């Protein structure tokens, strides 16, 4: 159980393109999902916390207008990188927690999306 | 603010050796959770263990064991008889209790483990 699906797994696109990444909890409901960014050989940095039915909470230094997050249902959150540029190239990972199992269950991660902007 | 330190950037061992990955954390909360995740070369994060701050019992799962020492704010991870398949980056992480943003994870910088034949 507790499977998180992330799509697409790899994106290569031209500078200026907007890219949407989907994160789905397949067998549980997730009122809260998290979006992380990881540069090569570095740790995961939390970008934002996505809350179902409300606005996302962004970490300091993360541009809200650049990284649009929508959490329209209990099983889906999307991250849209708007007008992407080469410096946005990174590995983006989402996670979700199964609140139905009680508080502070471990976060389960998607397989990540490698974004390359040319 | 909470912080997780993994001082070992890279470790190289020969198969069948035991290896310990260190994790030291800082938090002002009295109740918190500690985690270890494995990230193989393919990139996905694999959950290994969760430990809450009130449970200082060490845990063993197969070749994996964890030593939680609250007095030294450490949560070390030992792999016994390492195998090539253990090669990965291992992350230690900390979260406060609560819901929503209060339960976000703070990751250490990771330890890259290379197991060779």
Image (cartoon, coloured by chain):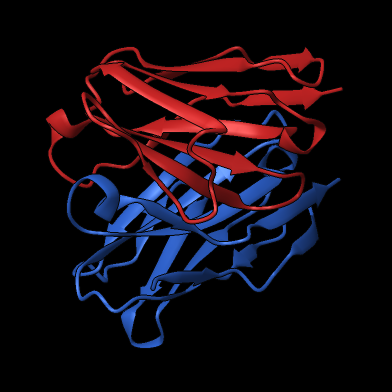
Chain colours: A red, B blue
Residue drawn at (65%, 62%) of the image? B18
Among the 4 quarters of the image, the one containing residue A63: top right
For the residue pair B77 and A20, the one nearer the viewer reads as A20
Residue A42 to residue A28: above or below: below
Residue drawn at (42%, 33%) of the image? A95
Q: Is residue A47 left or right of residue B82?
A: left
Residue B56 to residue B105: above or below: below
Number of numbered markers: 0
Q: Is residue A48 left or right of residue B86?
A: left
For the residue pair B53 and A62, the one nearer the viewer reads as A62
Among the 4 quarters of the image, the one containing residue B54: bottom left
Which quarter shows the C terminus of chain A?
top right
- Percent position of residue A1, x then y: 31, 20
Q: Is residue A97 left or right of residue B78?
A: left
- Percent position of residue A106, x then y: 32, 42
For the residue pair B23 and A38, the one nearer the viewer reads as A38
Among the 4 quarters of the image, the one containing residue B88: top right
Q: Is residue A19 left or right of residue B36?
A: right
Viewer can see residue A90: yes
Viewer can see residue B16: no
- Percent position of residue A15, x then y: 80, 21
Residue drawn at (34%, 12%) of the image? A26
């Amino acid at each position: 159980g507790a499977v998180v699906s992330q799509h697409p797994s790899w994106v290569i696109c031209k500078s200026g393109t907007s890219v949407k990444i989907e994160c789905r909890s397949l067998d549980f409901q997730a009122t809260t999902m998290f979006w992380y960014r990881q540069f090569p050989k570095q740790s995961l940095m939390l970008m934002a916390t996505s809350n179902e039915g409300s606005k996302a909470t962004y970490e300091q230094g993360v541009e809200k207008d650049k990284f649009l997050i929508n959490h329209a249902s209990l099983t889906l959150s999307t991250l849209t990188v708007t007008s992407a540029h080469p410096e946005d190239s990174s590995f983006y990972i989402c996670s979700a927690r199964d609140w139905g199992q009680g508080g502070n269950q471990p976060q389960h991660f998607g397989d990540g999306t490698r974004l390359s902007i040319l | 603010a909470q912080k997780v330190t993994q001082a070992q950037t890279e470790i190289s061992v020969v198969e069948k050796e035991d290896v310990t990955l260190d994790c030291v954390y800082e938090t002002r909360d009295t109740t918190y959770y500690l985690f270890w995740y494995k990230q193989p070369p393919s990139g996905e994060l694999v959950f290994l263990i969760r430990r809450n701050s009130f449970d200082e019992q060490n845990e063993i799962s197969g070749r994996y064991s964890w030593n939680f020492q609250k007095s030294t704010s450490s949560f070390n991870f030992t792999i016994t008889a390492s195998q090539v398949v253990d090669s990965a980056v291992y992350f230690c992480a900390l979260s406060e209790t609560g819901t929503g943003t209060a339960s976000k994870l703070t990751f250490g910088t990771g330890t890259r483990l290379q197991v060779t034949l």
